Image (spheres, rainbow, N blue to C red):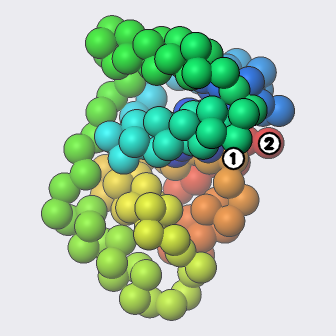
Amino acid sequence: MIYIDTSVLAAYYCPEILSDQVQLYLSRQVKPALSFLTEVELYSAVARKVRSQEMEMADANRIFAKFQSHLDAEFFTIIPVQNHHWRLARGWIGLFSAPLRTLDALHLSVASAEDLELVTSDKHLYSSAGILGVKAGLIG
């Protein structure tokens, strides 16, 4: 099973350069995993597009409704972020071996602890996964 980060989820729901590639990739997956951290980041990314006038509010609301319908239909496997994920992320940041941002460390810790392959379009996150020995795939 794969764990998708926000860069992939956003490209799935929002029109972006990688959207076609991400949609094709995800159509071949059975219940890809994500966390509610990913959900909050998706909402943040869409809200940023509205504030910067890259997207209309009505389109953002359609994206939110479609995403919610996918959650309701159990299109995704939801992985709750638990204490051991936070501790692992904190430990990796404290190693100073990878240029980890807080939320990236959490995504990596969820994927690693649950023995999932992280799928991302973020080259920095992908690189950090390699440094830390986390299974990862890069789209784009």
Is 57 drawn above or below residue 62 in the view shown? Answer: below
The residue that appears at 74% across and 32% down in the rendered structure is 54
Name the residue nearer the viewer: 112 or 23. 23
Q: Position of residue 76 (x, y in %)?
A: 38, 24
Which amino acid type corresponds to the residue marked 2 in the rendered image?
Answer: Gly
Q: Position of residue 23 (x, y in %)?
A: 67, 20
Horizontal relation, residue 110 to residue 108: left or right: left
Q: Which residue is mark 1?
A: 121
Which amino acid type corresponds to the residue marked 1 in the rendered image?
Answer: Ser
Q: CA distance from mark 1 to mark 2?
A: 6 Å
Work out which quarter of the rendered image holds the C terminus and state it: top right
Residue 28 visible somewhere in the drawing: no
Name the residue nearer the viewer: 50 or 82. 50
The residue that appears at 70% across and 41% down in the rendered structure is 52
Work out which quarter of the rendered image holds the N terminus and state it: top left
Q: Which residue is mark 2?
A: 140
The residue that appears at 53% across and 12% down in the rendered structure is 62
Q: Position of residue 11 (x, y in %)?
A: 67, 31
